[in-house]
Amino acid sequence: MLTLENVHTHYGPIEALKGVSLNVQQGEIVTLIGANGAGKSTLLMTVCGDPRASAGTITWKGNDITKEETSKIMRTGLAVVPEGRRVFSAMTVEENLSMGGFFNKTTYDQRMAHVLELFPRLEERFKQRAGTMSGGEQQMLAIGRALMSEPELLILDEPSLGLAPLIINQIFDIIHKLRDEGMTIFLVEQNANQALRLADRGYVIENGKIVLEDTGANLLVNEDVRKAYLGG
Amino acid sequence: MQSRFTSALFAALLTLLLGSLLLGVTMVSEGIDLVLELSEPHKIYGLIIGAALVFIIQYFKQEVGAVTTRLRGDGSFEMPAFIRTPKQQRLWGFMAVGALLIFPFVSSRGAVDIATLTLIYVMLGLGLNIVVGLAGLLDLGYVGFYAVGAYSYALLNFYFGLSFWVALPIAGLLAALFGFILGFPVLRLRGDYLAIVTLGFGEIIRILLNNWTDLTGGPNGIARIPKPDLFGLEFNRRASEGGQTFHEFFGIPYSSEYKVIFLYLLAFALVLLTLYVINRLIRMPIGRAWEALREDEIACRALGLNPTVIKLTAFTIGASFAGFAGSFFAARQGFISPESFTFIESAIILAIVVLGGMGSQLGIILAAMAMTILPEMAREFDEYRMLLFGLMMVLMMIWRPQGLLPMKRPHLELKRD
Ligand SMILES: Nc1ncnc2c1ncn2[C@@H]1O[C@H](COP(=O)(O)OP(=O)(O)O)[C@@H](O)[C@H]1O
Ligand SMILES: [Mg+2]
């Protein structure tokens, strides 16, 4: 469904991705784990065309999107929940969600109903300003907003960042539920333990390079992974 | 205590020193020589009082600070109790419209004239607010589009004899077109860079108008631009060829006041139309997109919105309102020249938007009134007008940095218990 082949990304002179290859198949949860600054966010955003890959090819649903505009890519069934949530804080929950469904008005009501069913909390806070909500609620809103575009592939960048364990569990439950509905998910996490337990497959990124690739279950018991990311 | 006294004394002495060089002495020519003389006593006294004031304010800085903090508030603004519900607001809105409709018939000609000028600035402020307040793009060349609108009507009338009513939409479209063409290459720029480039645009348009003498008459401008008519009825003493005048049609004696009142009502109608259109736009997806863009450009891109396109619509639509305002301005003045479209106009319009509290329409209306009516009332201090203007801005920055009436979005904030 999504394939990256030998992708390089530069920030000026800095090479943040040094030839990354990976793929995500339909219906899978694939996770990418790695330390701070390893290039996880860069990889995700390169898929979205922002920043643009400087070499290599990115294929999405059979089309080469390496040189496509971000705004076009994001309207082809791909949705991203960026790192740090980035909700529109002066807008209400409802308005935030409506921004997510900006380009597809035909099934708007259905999707809104679906998102509110997934996140009853958002329905309670429907008219509240996003900026006044808690971190967990904002993360739910960010995911809900991304779902409003009815994506086939949902990309999540560290959804558990800065949240309390209880809330993290809720977020992971939702991801599980989405997968059961048939959504394909590409999940970036530092919280490797939970991410690998949930994922079908996982990749480990170090210094802009993929160093390991295996099933989630295998990575969980891998000696190197345990040492580096699971605390022994 | 010691340092408080010395710093206050230092500030006062500095004021005295700078002030006495600027105001305390005058240059008088004696023959071919220039000699310095002490100014008249009242200026000297003024200086001393000024320095004393500085000393007192500096000395009691903490106490003054406490007062200003209280005045500043927490940034949110509550409407008084009697205009809180939408129903009450609508009622007050209707009453305000009614009062403004009656106003020209019960006021002096001069007052109506100033009110018309205020309405032009309201229109300009509302238009620029789309660009600066809603989309968050700092545009320092807005006056350029105002000039395009004014010259559109003046030139279309001069060369093709088009009437105001035909030229008005064309002027809006032309200004929008200029906004589009100029905006396209630069809207990728951010913040400061965008501000500088737009500043350049405003100047380029003015310089072009100044130098393209064959077309625009250059610095001499264009004179005898006809006033708008009312369904073909003119407001002149004598009708033009094949025309008919207002007073003849109604069989009433001629009075130049009709024209003034008509212009006021026309400007008022244009402002109402502007308000209506902008309020519709804000509620449409494009209005949301402007707001979203101002808040978080990265999030917008992640959602598939194209920031350049969104900025361009704001720039273009904003410019079109300057175009309407410009053609009305040309019609009202009857004479335009590049002089009317200098950078200071951009600055005043921007000041109205900022003073009004970025994004708030009621705030902009109040600020436009303040910016046009106060200087008129302070005519005697003509040479100090810009000084007053600066003083006002500084005071605003201290007391209400968020503007007179910061934009208030409809939302529900749950009270903490
Ligand atoms: N906008 C940027 N400009 C320059 N360097 C960047 C930028 N964003 C990220 N980087 C660098 O790229 C590398 C990868 O960063 P990132 O993808 O954010 O890592 P992660 O998400 O894994 O923590 C880091 O060395 C970081 O400093
Ligand atoms: Mg990251």
Image (spheres, coloured by chain):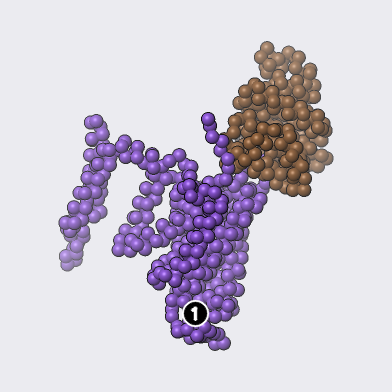
Residue B366, placed above or below residue B161:
above
| Residue density around tag 1, few if under 14, some if 14–19, many if 20 or more, within 10 Å | many
Indicate the quadrant where residue A53 lies.
top right
Q: Colour of chain A?
A: brown
Q: Secondary structure under badge 1?
A: loop
What is the x, y in percent for residue B417?
Answer: 53, 30
Ligand 1 closer than 8 Å to label 1 CB: no
Residue B110, placed above or below residue A148:
below
Output the letter for the chain in purple.
B
Q: In the picture provided, is B105 more to the left or to the right than B272?
A: left
Residue carrying label 1? B235
Q: Residue at x 43, y 59 (%)?
A: B369
Residue A24, placed above or below residue B158:
above
The residue most toward the bottom is B241
Q: In the picture provided, is B62 more to the left or to the right than B122?
A: left
Q: Amino acid at mark 1?
A: Phe
Q: Residue at x 20, y 49 (%)?
A: B48
Closer to us: B63 or A24: B63
Q: How many marks?
A: 1
Q: In the picture provided, is B86 more to the left or to the right than A150?
A: left
